[in-house]
Image: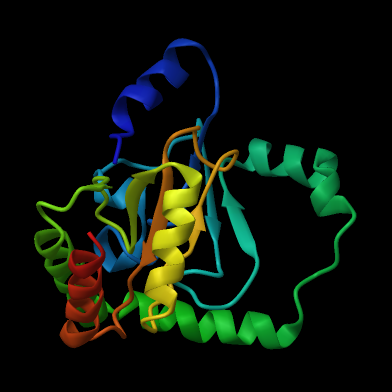
Amino acid sequence: MAKIQPYEAHADRYDAWLIIDDAHGFGVLGAQGKGSLSHFNLPASRRVLLMGTLGKAAGVGGAFVAGSEIAIEYLLQRARSYIFTTAAPPAVACALSASLNIIRQGDALRSALMARIAQLRQGLGGLPWTLLASPTAIQPLIVGENDAALALSKALWERGLWTPAIRPPTVPKGTARLRISLSAAHTSDDIDQLINALKELA
C-alpha cells in the first residue's frame, strides 16, 4: 500500500487536489476504522478529496466524498452524476447510521480481520502465484494470464470457495488475479480451507 505523504506534498507544490479512493481503508484501517488518513497519521487537508464506498466495510450501499467546503460545493454544482441522481432511501440512511456505530466500536472485529489476513498471508507463502502487499480485507493473488486465473477461480468454486478472477482491462495485461476478500466473519477454518485448496491446485 503506497504511502500518501509524497502525493500530498506534490499536491501542495502544484496547487492541486489529491483524490484518495479509500474504498478498502474506510472502516478497516486507522483509529476506529477512520481510514487511510488516520492509518498514516495525516491531518485533514483542504487539498484532499476523500472518497469511500458504503458497500464494503459499512455493508450498506452508495458512497461518499469528503473535502473542503469549496471542493464539495463545486461537486454539488457541477458533478452530473450527483445532480441527476436521487437521494438514498431513508432505510439505507438508518442502516448506515447503525453501521457507523459498529465501525466506531469495532476494534475487536478489526483485530479478528487482521488475524485472518495474517493467517492467509503466512499460509500462501511459497506458492507459484504472487500475493500483493495489502493490509486490507482485499488480498490480490496475481496469477498472470487470463485463462489461468479463470481456471483457478473455477477450480476453487467447485470446492465451495468464491474467489472471482479479475482480468484486463480492469488490471494491467498479464496480471490477471484472484480477488480474495476476507471479513471478520471468516473463521480460522475458513482460511485454512482456502489455503489448502490453493496448495492442492498449485
| The N terminus - image quarter | top left
Whether residue 26 appears in this view of the structure is no
Q: Closest to the observer: 5 or 198?
A: 198
Residue shown at 25%/48% (left/top)?
Answer: 129
> In the image, is residue 103 above or below residue 3?
below
Q: Is residue 154 left or right of residue 68?
A: left
Residue lying at the far top of the rendered structure: 14
Q: Residue 201: x percent and y percent?
A: 26, 65
Residue lying at the far right of the rendered structure: 84
Q: Closest to the observer: 165 or 51?
A: 165
Q: Residue 172: x percent and y percent?
A: 49, 33
Q: Closest to the observer: 130 or 103?
A: 130
| The C terminus - image quarter | bottom left
* Image quadrant assignment for residue 118: bottom left
> In the image, is residue 10 above or below residue 117?
above
Q: Residue 30: x percent and y percent?
A: 27, 58
> In the image, is residue 78 above or below residue 201?
above
- The image shows a total of numbered marks equal to 0
Whether residue 167 appears in this view of the structure is yes
Q: Closest to the observer: 11 or 166?
A: 166
Q: Residue 134: x percent and y percent?
A: 27, 50
* Image quadrant assignment for residue 77: top right
Residue shown at 29%/68% (left/top)?
Answer: 32
